[in-house]
Image (cartoon, helix red, strand yellow):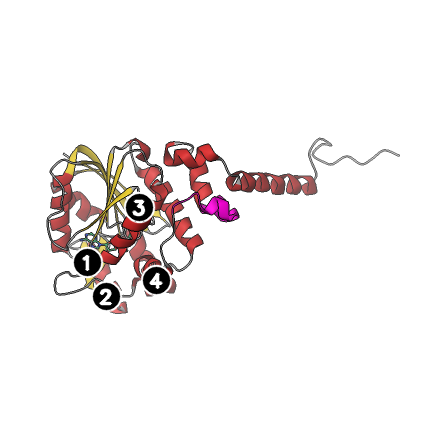
């Protein structure tokens, strides 16, 4: 008896076959990410970037031996205070996501910069991913506890404590790349202008700056998603006010009690519109582009060029 042919031809693999192949493909990819490859670890961001990203997010957790090859993780207390994360795997995943988003946004591969400043390094969520970086990596922060941990644990980072609203301890035209994640998201307008002036001073002409802000997407999500609204820890009425302010002035700052907020430094939640950046930040830098919601469908990355 003739076997009945599949209506789209007998060559097409069965659904089960395709499912099994796809599972095998996923397993292969996972195994590759888990595999211990000395060159990959040695090259870090100078080698195969995707493999380095995957190793940090997944492979590192396959064994103790692998874990010892990536940068150390901060103590849970510091991690939570600075990033609201409690779990090392989440912290690693954020490092992966941030480095990936920055690499997409940067006009030049991050590995090609010679002198990088991480402004508000925190406890190294991004700096950890630069393990093995062949340029010079400086991390500064006003939180002395954070800086003490970075100095002790990430020996390839030049970790320096700075004071709020004081000139940065660097000569003019020093850095060819400045990165700042989740710092301009907390500044008053006065502090923002102070630090834009300082960053313009310490950036070399032609330097790339990658600074994140809360823009339209974060506000939209705060308006519609309870989890995001609660995470921002601002009163409900301030979200309504922020919507009006973004449409008019383009800048909104809501002071927050606790944290870094003190007599010496106002710390809160800041939203900045793209129009405002084009208008105000262009007094300090050329605006290369704004990548909306580039990190976690949340913060925008503003790409600037120093003059
Ligand atoms: C939300 S955390 C983000 C830390 C890190 N960039 C990250 O993405 O994990 C903000 C960090 O910026 C630091 N910071 C705030 N204002 C600063 C300033 N004016 N100069 C340097 N660091 C500052 C805080 O102490 C804190 O460590």
- Left or right of residue 264, residue 157 in this image: right
| Residue 117 picture location, percent across and down | 23, 42
Mark 1 crowd level (few <14, some 14–19, many ≥20, 10 Å Cα): many
| Front position among marks 2 and 4 | 4
Q: CA distance from mark 3 to mark 1?
A: 18 Å
Q: Which mark is residue 77?
A: 4
User: Of label 3 and label 4, which has the lower sequence position?
Assistant: 4
SS at mark 2? helix
Alpha carbon distance from label 3 to label 4: 31 Å
First reached walking from the N terminus: tag 2 or tag 1: 2
* Dot 1: element: strand
Q: Residue at x 69, y 39 (%)?
A: 17
Q: Which residue is mark 1?
A: 252
Q: Position of residue 294 (x, y in %)?
A: 34, 45
Is residue 10 positioned above or below 165 on the image?
above
Extent of the magenta region? 57-71
Give the main secondary structure of the magenta stretch.
Answer: helix
Q: Please report contact status of discs 2 and 1: CB closer than 8 Å, yes or no.
A: yes
| Label 3 crowd bin: few (<14), some (14–19), many (20+), radius 10 Å | many
Asked whether 210 or 120 is in front, the reply is: 120
Report if the beta carbon of the residue with label 2 is closer than 8 angstroms to ligand 1.
Answer: no
Magenta region includes residue 59: yes
Q: Is label 1 in contact with label 4 (beta carbons under 8 Å)?
A: no
Q: Badge 3 is on which residue?
A: 292
Q: Circle 2 is placed at which residue position?
A: 238
**Residue 124 in view of the camera:** no
Circle 4 sits in a helix, a strand or a loop, which is it? helix
Instruction: Please state, as top left, top right, bottom left or bottom right, where the C terminus lies in the image.
Output: top left
């Amino acid at each position: 008896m003739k076997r009945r042919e599949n209506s789209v031809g007998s060559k097409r693999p069965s659904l089960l076959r395709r499912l099994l192949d796809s599972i095998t493909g996923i397993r292969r990819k996972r195994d590759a990410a888990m595999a211990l490859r000395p060159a990959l670890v040695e090259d870090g961001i100078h080698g195969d970037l995707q493999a380095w990203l995957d190793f940090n997010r997944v492979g590192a957790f396959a064994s103790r031996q692998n874990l010892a090859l990536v940068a150390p993780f901060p103590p849970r207390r510091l991690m939570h205070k600075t990033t609201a994360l409690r779990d090392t795997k989440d912290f690693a995943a954020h490092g992966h996501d941030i480095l990936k988003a920055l690499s997409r946004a940067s006009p030049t591969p991050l590995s090609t910069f010679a002198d990088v400043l991480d402004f508000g390094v925190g406890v190294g969520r991004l700096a950890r991913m630069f393990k093995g970086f062949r340029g010079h990596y400086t991390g500064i922060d006003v939180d002395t506890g954070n800086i003490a941990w970075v100095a002790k644990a990430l020996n390839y980072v030049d970790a320096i404590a700075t004071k709020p609203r004081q000139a940065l301890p660097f000569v003019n035209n020093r850095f060819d790349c400045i990165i700042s994640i989740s710092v301009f998201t907390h500044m008053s307008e006065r502090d923002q202008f102070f630090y834009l002036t300082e960053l313009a001073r310490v950036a070399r002409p032609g330097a790339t700056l990658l600074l994140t802000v809360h823009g339209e997407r974060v506000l939209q999500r705060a308006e519609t998603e309870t989890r995001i609204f609660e995470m921002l820890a601002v009163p409900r009425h301030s979200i309504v006010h922020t919507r009006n302010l973004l449409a008019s002035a383009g800048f909104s700052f809501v002071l927050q009690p606790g944290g870094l907020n003190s007599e010496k430094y106002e710390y809160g939640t800041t939203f900045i519109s793209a129009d405002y950046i084009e208008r105000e930040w262009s007094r300090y830098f050329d605006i290369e582009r704004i990548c909306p919601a580039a990190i976690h469908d949340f913060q925008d990355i503003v790409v600037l060029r120093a003059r």
